[in-house]
Amino acid sequence: MEKKGSKREAVLTALEHEGLSREGIARVAELTGIPEADIYGAGSFYTLLTDPGPRVCQGLSCQLNGFEELAKQLEATGQTVHRVSCLGQCDRAPVSLNAENRLEAAAPRGGITPDNPDLPMNLGGADDVNYTALQRAKEMGAEAVIAELEVSGLQGRGGAGFPAHIKWRAVRAEAAEPKYVICNADEAEPGTFKDRELMLRRPHLLLESLAIAAWTTGAEAIYIYVRGEFPEEKESLENALSKGGLEEFDFRFVVGHGAYICGEETALIESIEGRRGMPRIKPPYPTQQGLWGKPTLMNNVETLACVPDILLRGGERFRDLGHTEAGTKLYCLSGHVNRPGVYELPLGATLDDLVEVGGGYVGTPMAFSPGGASSGVLPIALRNAPMDFRGLAKHGSMLGSAGVVVLNDTVDMAVIARIQAVFFEDESCGQCAPCRIGARLVRQALDSYLEKGNPDALQYLDDLAWEMEEGSICGLGMVAAEPAVTARKHFPDHFGPRT
């Protein structure tokens, strides 16, 4: 039984140092007052705690660029190599992490949009250390700040596209205290690496945005949950914070421990609290009962990074920067293109617009994933469709995190579908049966088809996808079958009889 005054939030950090051995767990139990079985249950959920040692990314972009050869090279040196889900370095593929969780065998970071002061996030520009937007917020007043966000039309850039002002207003209106702000920097969607670049290139921009959010909502503390595979990004933010100017705010860093599902907001909260990262049933929503059961505002890195420009230059200006929806968007580009990278374009840009700034296609383009693994695949015939939140939904896809992966005609779409199916099976938290069982059945069906060449192996795929979408607790299970379903829909010739 959990002791009074226990320190559950310290469990995962303590396990980093003590490990998951019987002796290590006993020491953590003594330190935190949490039962040993509970500690093991929490720690065994996270791959950075269970699988120490070199890790090789087997995400889609790395698979397209020779991840297996890299893995074999490392294994030839006598190392035990873990093949893991996307490491958020798709522009540098293939990549690996060493035993100290540092990148190895990685190319230089990809391209970015050159310095342009008209861009709200402007990755190529100098980071502003003066925090003028924070001062502007205080001059405007909290209600005016939220009103300006509403005028701007800013939608969540983490994948859901939910209007930002609604969350901010909801947390501010809650009577319960204390309140919290959480920055979701657990970027782990395959094909996505935009938040990484913001944290590395514009750390002051993000910190200022969080300060504005905390001041506006009346939050007591600011938690920055940084993906465990991003130590350099965390150091960038810590170094920026050490420069001073934000001493009135209580910033707290939390490091993830290797679980894609913690990108889901309630799973992330569970992780901060020292538990397995399993999504909660909603409602209640985090804006009502979030961290420690208190009102909590959670936004993605990119969402927050748009706020200073909105306050300094106006919501209308930001809204009008978009082609089809409000503002600019950081689009991640990888796969069969000449210059992978992160490019800031008007929201609603097309694939051709994006690839043009990315140096053009490699080979003959055949398909693309517009929003990471969760968005499935689309045929290249839709290369001029606006990549925005509403438009892609009309084509049975979604913008998601805007992790765009281009595929040329050298790939086998059934193999591509299996790569993505492995990802979702590996990253399912296992809490609900539709996702836990369904993700495995999708992968097994593709394995059977690729092994035997009989399309009958896929006859129940659509029914399975429907059950997963309708019955899963969170978004992972709802979309886990999408890569297979959409690949089969748009490329039926890749799923015929094989000899």
Image: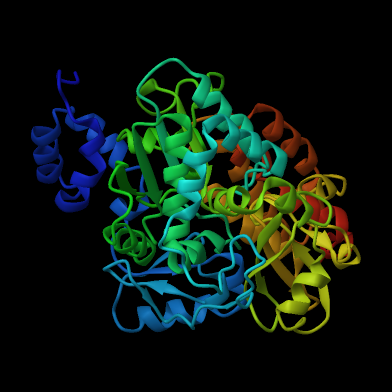
In this view, 474 is above or below 207: above
Query: Please, is residue 225 above or below residue 496 in the view?
Result: above
Q: Hey, which residue is sitting farthest right in the picture?
A: 381
Q: Position of residue 162 (x, y in %)?
A: 66, 37
Q: Is residue 428 visible?
A: no
Q: Residue 71 sits in which quadrant?
A: bottom left
Residue found 31% across the figure and 83% down from its top:
77
Please tell me whether residue 396 is drawn above or below residue 359 in the rendered image: above
Horizontal arrangement in the rendering, residue 160 relative to residue 104 (left or right): right
Left or right of 475? Residue 246 is left
On screen, residue 153 versus residue 424, left or right, reads right
How far across and how far down the image is residue 186, in percent? 46, 51
Residue 405 visible to the viewer: yes
Using the image as rendered, state which of residue 168 and residue 410 is in the foreground: 168
Image location of residue 384, percent across then percent down: 89, 65
The reply, left or right, for residue 127 in relation to residue 364 is: left
Using the image as rendered, state which of residue 233 and residue 383 is in the foreground.
Answer: 233
Here the colouring is rainbow
Residue drawn 18% across the image and 45% down it: 14
Q: Nearer the viewer, residue 347 or 480?
A: 347
Q: Nearer the viewer, residue 344 or 407?
A: 344
Where does the N terminus fall, quadrant-wise?
Answer: top left
Total marks shown come to 0
Q: Residue furthest top?
A: 175
Question: Looking at the image, which residue is at 49% across and 43% down?
Answer: 261
| x and y, in percent, of residue 446 in the image | 69, 55
Q: Is 148 drawn above or below residue 205 in the view shown?
A: above
Q: What residue do we see at 61% from left, 43% from top?
A: 439
Quadrant where the image shows the C terminus = bottom right
